Amino acid sequence: MLEIEIDGKKLTVPTGSTVMDAANSIGVHIPHFCYHKKLSIAANCRMCLVQVEKAPKPLPACATPVTDGMKVYTHSDMAVKAQKGVMEFLLINHPLDCPICDQGGECQLQDLAVGYGQSGSRYEEEKRVVANKNLGPLISTDMTRCIHCSRCVRFTEEIAGYQELGMPGRGEHTEVMSFIGKTVNSEISGNVIDLCPVGALTSKPFRYSARTWELSRRKSVGAHDGLGANLVVQVKNNQVMRVLPLENEAINECWLSDRDRFSYEALNSAARLTQPMVKDGGQWKVVGWQEALELVATKLKGITASHGADSVAAIASPNSTLEELYLLRKSLAGLDIRNLEARTRLGDVRFETKAAGWLGQSIVDLAASESLLLIGSTLRKEQPLLAQRLRQSVKKGLKLALINPHDDELLCAVAGKLVVRPDQLVEGVLAVLKAAADITGKAVPADIDLAGVEVSTEARALAELIVAGEKKSLVLGNIALQHERAAELHAAAAALAEIAGATLGLLRDGANSVGADIVGFATNKDLITANKKAYVLLHSELADLKQGAKAAFEGAEFVVAMTSFADEARDYADVLLPVSPFSETSGTFVNMEGKPQSFNGVVRPLGETRPAWKVLRVLGNILGLNGFDYDSSEAVRGDVLNGDIAKVLDNTPAKAVAVKAQATAGLVRLAEVPLYETDALVRRAPSLQATVDAESAAQLRANAATLASFGLVAGGNACVQQGGASVTLAVAEDAGLPDQVVRVPFGRATLALGSGAIEVIKA
Amino acid sequence: MVTSNQAPTLSAESQAQIDRELAKYPADQRRSALMSALRIAQVEHRWLSNELIAVVADYVGVPPIAAMEVATFYNMFDRAPVGRHKITVCTNLPCALSGGYKAADYLKQKLGIGFNETTADGKFTLKEGECMGACGYAPVLLVNNHSMCNHMTPDAIDKKLAELE
Amino acid sequence: MTVYVKGVVFEGVDFDDPKHWGIEAYMARGGYTALKKILSTGMTQDEIIAEMKTSGLRGRGGAGFPTGLKWSFMPRSFPGQKYLVCNTDEGEPGTFKDLDIIVDNPHALIEGMIIGGFAMGITVGYNYIHGEVFEAYERFEAALEEARAAGFLGDNILGTSFCFQLHGHHGYGAYICGEETALLESLEGKKGQPRFKPPFPASFGLYGKPTTINNTETFASVPYIIREGGQKFLELGKPNNGGTKLFSVSGHVNRPGNYEIPLGTPFSELLEMCGGMRDGKKLKAVIPGGSSAPVLPADIMMQCTMDYDSISKAGSMLGSGAVIVMDETTCMVKALERLSYFYFEESCGQCTPCREGTGWLYRVVHRIEQGLGRPEDLDLLLSVGGNIAGRTICALGDAAVMPVQGMLKHFRSEFEHHIEHKQCLVPGF
Ligand SMILES: Cc1cc2nc3c(=O)[nH]c(=O)nc-3n(C[C@H](O)[C@H](O)[C@H](O)COP(=O)(O)O)c2cc1C
Ligand code: SF4
Ligand code: FES
């Protein structure tokens, strides 16, 4: 600990602190632009110059280490003169376009100029003009405003993991840009907008749509992945105009994924469903809520009466709130309907956890692991901010290892990896398990047959890594959980975790996957191929479900879609109920670490839209059920989460599953849900759909040898046939895939495809 | 923007030279050879197009924007086509005191071009340079980045220009 | 052709011999005996560093920091890799001495670096060579090959357990890379942008490892010091200003060139060695230590001796030893305009005061030179300069301001004349 005095206030700070750290700790504000607590120190803006006793020159607070007994003056003549001098330099080439600048009102330069600037300018030479750059559909540029703080550049390099922005040029000709002709493609790129202290980088979708002071700020929670990022939603005239991160160090830190940031565009989409509708003789007809819900009640009652309660199923998006799911369950339970599923992409009905499946620990704890074995995950796309956090952990010593069916860059050092065919993921885990059993001398459970499992050197290295040390984690990602042998992967991973003394975790895909498990939206039956007579859909659409869903719905007697959008479900539903997206309802998401986060609606529901929990409450009443007199979502929540949440979380496999290595050959498909195909909102956000990531959702990728074996060329087209259907996709090369693997994503472009044997021909 | 569907390549000789530079640095510090690699690529292709920069970045193993930063920071890299011979005249103060501007003026008049221009036949490009660390030998010219010419009086300039093909 | 007088770096070099730079000629004049002495007599690291301290050798790169002291800062027992770096970036206008060292006596530098490596327990070194002198870089690489072939470089030097690898690294045109931390960034393959200090290179240098950086001439002086003893070197100069030093004399003298003379030699003698003023013109002013040093008028300069203390007392700096001589025909406005352009052009652009301020300074001086100056411009220049100096990451900011301050201190009336009459007082260049 070191002693320091700042503006006469004495304090002690840990060794290694900077003057800026010390000042921040006692709430003394030192003006700055380039300094950012999450980025490396650049000390280039010089705005934070302060006077340090005995130093002949003012020193930058952000970069000056505290020495014992140091005395700092942040407002002395020397300090203020230096700060004013810097401010003058920053302003001489800065345009005076605050009135038309999107940053106006939240501009650090503008704010500080008020305190440190002068009224007139002494600079009478010509001002610099800098050409704007095209950084893609998300980030807009006004480069003349750039003050060269280099935050955005450091962000791409240090936080996003790959330098996409740079500062070519020298001296005053230095300009921030991406490589000529390239856009910024990071899945967390939008953070540079927040980092930019001036209006050089602003949000393209938001551009010119509102002035910041017209916006009201409301808290919410990210609705697209299991992280549960905390949000500030900015609203004008009852419309969501912009989404920003709300800092929460334990969850999203100060960042936001582009998915959470830009998906709001869908909230204002023309495709919104605004009135209840029923299909009447093949024609859609607008009806009142009462009429619609009565119809639903009658239909469900009728079908359960004639075909039994098992003939009805409810399928909900894992991004539905806890309250919605609970009331859906409760209302259907009144009709004895028990077929409930929110794990819409589960590949294996045998997969079952003892209680709700979760990360197995907090996000912070996971990141503090010594080693982490990630099985079957395209982490950067599945959980963009978790990938970012682990990247920082790797820099601090985390050994991150992978068993994956691809070799995608995590943009951080990887301590070991095993790349296998997607249908050999189980065998990959078994190999590591066998090696781990071998190293530790521990026995594997009887249901796991290790006969014929070959241990490669890579598998052995992974085993050594995961058995060593104290704090270890083993995590199954989306590819594993959506795998058709997910239950075997689960069993093998659990056994490996047990032998290695590692914590087993599941990376849940939805914003409320864990909550859905808690509510009981997990039936372990394939509700789609079972061709039920009636389906109740909550926020879920075809692209959220398994192939074949459309046929199942079309074949059903009755389908009610509780949805925010009118454009898809009208093809197969009989009743459309406009329910609120997350922005228009209060509710709760339980994130991957089992943390419930409740939020309020940030805008009024659009048109006749109603929060689904309210709709279901009315449905319960119409069905004549008891216990439906909730007056708030909090009251609903109280009924679900009424004890220690830890007790309802448990990743242990619920039943033993026989695991045995299987041989495979031939062409196999790796089908993942792409970054911007995850849910109804994301799929309708035009800016996200204009990204390079969105483009890849309609691509077939394979390694060069595999492409060649089918006569395919990158840039050409391929016709993919599977399950009796075919689609044409653009072809791209992916050197990280094993031979005879085609990466054909699961999304709208490939919805027609079934499962099983796959064929590829040149188109 | 340059549009050529044919990505430029590095000759085997250039690659061998780059490999020699790479060998000077620790295996995990390939980036250290980036400047040399760009120099070698520029010698082969005369100037650094965006495409060529990307090729060099790929060869060294750095993000293309990192190579772009380097290619635009050091002023001996040419980011636009230059003539067969690039002549850079030092006009910094010590040289100016001993005829730096006079040499430049003589060249301008003789070649009929100004600074940052190329003769119509594509033979010569004239550039103004900063101190080349040879002030005692002023006026100095640098020919094609790598050949320093001292005491460049008009006669010496005539002779030099005649030598250059 | 360069004119040399007498000094430790070029001692015994026969410039008429075309192979004077080669290893044979070097060894014939006593080269590599210092290294052999160390390796055969078992001279310890401490003894070498003590000898360096005794010599009073001050860094020849510009800052004049005592070399022995710098070497003693190197953490000798640091477990990982450490680096030794030579600064042959030499871009300071007026300076051209390091060029001659690597062209005419590269082995002195190589031997000096090997000894430095030994003294600080360093096994890998790089020499960063100025971009515009490619032929000199090739000469240095050739000398390295000779030294490797002779067993002075590489593994198990002269049969001992001492290993030292040395490589040349070629710059490509950026003055700022002479600043030692910019040089390190450049050596790492990045833009040459100086790092904020602390941490200093001795703890966080090349690739984040402890690193010692010295100027070419500094290293090239080492063999002499080890061979002949620090005391002898010290006595060549004067106290606190040990040894001889290379002065690069340019501008209006009859014989510009490098002069290696004892520190403390009167300027007037140096001027005489250079054959006096060109065309018999009158001396007007001298920039005594490279373009970053404040200019001194003739009368002050003629009173100075060429050493750190005397020049500093006169209000300037010995710097890198570049002596830019200007006669009565030189227009100081033009001279300053050209220098200001240089700093504007060479600012790395990283920190605000230098990026924005150097352009401002240049544009105002340029305006004055163009006859568009205003009386208040001179105070504006000083004020803007005051907002740059001492506020930047590296000393280029200060360097850009010093010529302005020096010129306005000693030649303000000439600037005022220029503003008033919209033309030069004297023709200039
Ligand atoms: C802008 C700037 C340019 C410099 N250029 C050089 C140079 O060209 N050569 C050099 O040796 N030192 C130069 N230096 C000084 C170096 O930073 C460093 O002090 C020196 O290399 C240390 O070596 P020495 O102790 O042997 O002098 C420069 C410093 C600054 C601030
Ligand atoms: S003072 Fe100039 S050269 Fe030095 S770091 Fe700052 S901008 Fe770069
Ligand atoms: S915040 Fe310290 S220099 Fe920018």
Image (tube, coloured by chain):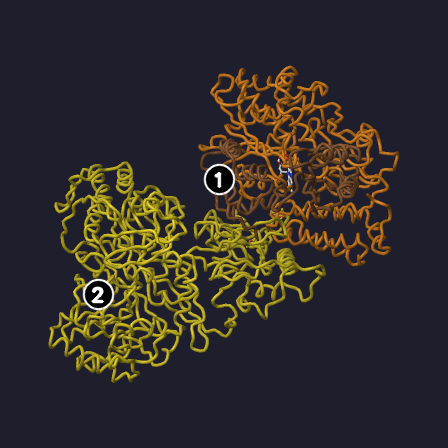
Q: Which residue is mark 1?
A: B60
Q: Which residue is mark 2?
A: A341
Chain yellow in the figure, letter:
A
Percent coordinates x, y for residue A318 in the rendering: 28, 65
Quadrant into which the N terminus of chain C falls: top right
Q: Nearer the viewer, residue A744 or B148?
A: A744
Q: Nearer the viewer, residue A279 or B37?
A: A279
Q: Quadrant of residue A128?
A: bottom right
Residue drawn at the location 52% of the way across and 72% of the way down: A211
Quarter of the image where one finds residue A90: bottom right
Residue A380 in the image, given as x and y percentages of width and height: 37, 53
The residue under label 1 is which amino acid type?
Answer: Val
State whether residue A502 appears in this view: yes
Q: Which chain is brown?
A: B
Q: Residue at x 43, y 50 (%)?
A: A161
Task: Point out residue C94 in the picture as x, y percentages from the top left corner.
Answer: 73, 37
> Which hue belongs to chain C?
orange
Task: Say which amino acid is labelled 2.
Answer: Glu
